[in-house]
Image (cartoon, rainbow, N blue to C red):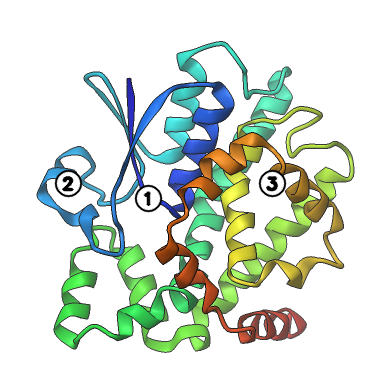
Amino acid sequence: MLILYDGTTSVCAIKVRITLVEKGLDFQSRNIDLRKGEQFSSDYLQLNPNAVVPTLVDGENIVLESSIIMQYLEDLIVDNSLLPESPQSRAKMRMWLKRIDDLVHPATGIITHATAFRPSFLQKSKKEQKAHLNKIPDIARRQRQEAVYKDGLNSPIVESAIHTFEKFICDMNTVLKEHEYISGSSYTLADAAATPYINRLASLKLLGVWRERAPKVFNWYDRICSRQSFEKAVTKYLTDSDVLQFSGIDDNVAVVARRILMQK
């Protein structure tokens, strides 16, 4: 039995859960409560010293990093392949995976922590805030969180994050004019990887910023939401606490994003 240590709303955990469902693989989900800081527990750090989710355990094998886990699952069984047929399309798919990991994921963290996660952080005492940040082993990630917890949407790095999404979504719209899915005519790992990030924009009331400029992305997202894997890997995992945390997003978030893009 495959064991996935994940988080209910973690974008990285979601893309792995989607892959597991799309591949038809049975797995056991073990939730790590990120808001309670369970990712910093000594037991979990023995599995994943980076203090992030997800972590896949396959017997004696421990696999880290969501994109690597996705490709590990693809290699595990040949059924329900999530790879394009041609080498050229596979290369393009892997470029999307890399782009999401290198650029889109940090941008998502910046915007999410500046909005949905900031209020609960500010409720902590100064000592608790410092202790939380000091536990984050990745210094760059720690500094990004500290910046947006301090200044919220006024943090300079928010502007960069919005522009990262502008390029990402507009480029997605361009390729989706040519074919139904990101890497071609079939659903692939690129679609699974992009899903939680577009879904996060929707949760943060930001996706509508691009409705007029990227209609093909909205068409793609509608199709994605109708897949069984979305219900099983995304919706099913949401807790009342998750819904509450994202329900309080201020409409001003979209206003700020539009202002940033107009100043481009």
Whether pointer 1 and pointer 3 mark residues with C-beta atoms closer than 8 Å, the reply is no
Label 1 neighbourhood size at 10 Å, few (<14), some (14-19), many (20+)? many
Secondary structure under tag 1 reads loop
Q: Left or right: 177 with respect to 199?
A: right
Image quadrant where residue 95 sits: top right
Secondary structure under tag 2 reads helix
Picture residue at 66% right of the left edge, 26% below the top: 90
Q: Residue under circle 1?
A: 7
Label 2 neighbourhood size at 10 Å, few (<14), some (14-19), many (20+)? some
Q: Left or right: 107 with respect to 5?
A: right
Q: Residue under circle 3?
A: 225
Mark nearer the N terminus (2 vs 3): 2
Under mark 3, the amino acid is: Cys
Under mark 1, the amino acid is: Gly
Q: Residue under circle 2?
A: 45
Picture residue at 31% right of the left edge, 85% below the top: 122
Along the viewing direction, whichever of 174 and 62 lies nearer the viewer? 62
Along the viewing direction, whichever of 218 and 69 lies nearer the viewer? 218
Find the distance from the CA under tag 1 to the CA under tag 3.
20 Å
- One can see residue 219 in this view: yes
Which residue lies most toward the front here? 240
Find the distance from the CA under tag 2 to the CA under tag 1.
15 Å
